[in-house]
Amino acid sequence: MSPAEAARSSRADGALLPAASGATQGGALAPVATTIAAWPAPYTGALALTFDVDARSVMLAASPANAARASLMSHQDYGPNVGVPRLLALLGDYGLRATFFVPGATADDYPGLLDAILAAGHEVGHHGYLHESLVGVDESTERRYLELGLEALDRVGSVRPAGYRAPWWEATDRTRVLLREFGFGYDTSYFDADGPYVVPGTEGQLVELPVSWALDDWERYAFWPQVTGDGRIDRPSEVAGAWLEEIEAIHAVGGLAVLTMHPFLSGRPARAAALRGLIERCLAIPGLYVTALDEVMRLCRDGAASTGADHESSVPKGM
Ligand code: ZN
């Protein structure tokens, strides 16, 4: 199921949460956005390389019957088994630190995966347990998904993630309230700004690191008949060129570009080669800080602490 299909299949009716839920107090429904990132010199913007290690989970969440589709499962296995090692080596060649969002089921199902990511010094974030869609779920269910993911990351890798990315980028009105309650430092599921901002009403404790479909590899590379994609698979060099254009423009307004990739897609040889070329171009851009999301979070929270979450003078032009 594509993200769009998932969204269409069971979209909530849009009703606001009951007041008792605390959602409005948490600010999740408040209008966006006070950006606070004043990039430390010499930086004038940032690029975060992020990888969603969905593997089998995304297909099993779409339909449990997919477990019996051995070829489809093998397509997903490529991510942890081949894509991740290749991408870790690529990142290592440039000494770059990235963020890997790992569903709990992926951590459980692929022994050694989490250890390999952590041993290379990368950040691991929360991405559900079985990549569950939050569309239409009640609060207790959303809490359970958070808990299951946390338990798996802790059990397998002793990880307490700072960051959360909603599966299919489908957060609910209550998601960021829950994230704050669970002690997360940032969310990266919203699309409402060019750069980071402190989520209103969270006393500077939760940062949003906004994303963009234009910087996601799924729409470019993913294809499986009757499952996802329309049969068009983009040429990697063209994808890298389009991404560079996006990154340069976001950097020009002092923002944060969050590049989102999936190892079962971008871990393929030609795509990884194109990513290498893109990384080299980005590292040559003066002032562009290529780093992991938890580092951006730290900069934002430091900024909030020193300037106040509503301090507009620190807002870079255009953000
Ligand atoms: Zn995902």
Image (cartoon, grey):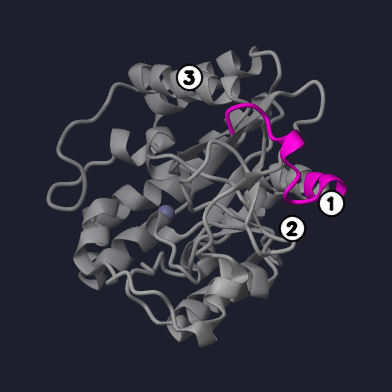
Q: Compared to 108, does 277 lie above or below?
A: above
**Residue 314 in magenta stretch:** yes
Q: CA distance from mark 2 to mark 1?
A: 7 Å
Query: What amino acid is at disc 1?
Result: Ala
User: x, y percentage for residue 97?
Assistant: 68, 37
Q: Quadrant of ligand 1?
A: bottom left
Mark 3 surroundings: few (<14), some (14-19) or many (≥20) residues within 10 A: some
Of the image marks 2 and 1, the number of the one nearer the N terminus: 2
Mark in the foreground, 3 or 2? 2
Mark number, residue 244: 3
> What span is in magenta?
303-319
Q: CA distance from mark 3 to mark 2?
A: 31 Å
User: x, y percentage for residue 118?
Assistant: 69, 51
Residues at discs 2 and 1 in contact (Cβ within 8 Å) = yes
Circle 2 — which element? Answer: loop
Relative side of 268 to 186, left or right: left
- Residue named by callout 1: 305
Label 2 CB-ligand 1 distance < 8 A: no
Q: Compared to 99, does 160 lie above or below?
A: below
Mark number, residue 165: none
Query: What amino acid is at disc 3?
Result: Leu
Residues at discs 1 and 3 in contact (Cβ within 8 Å) = no
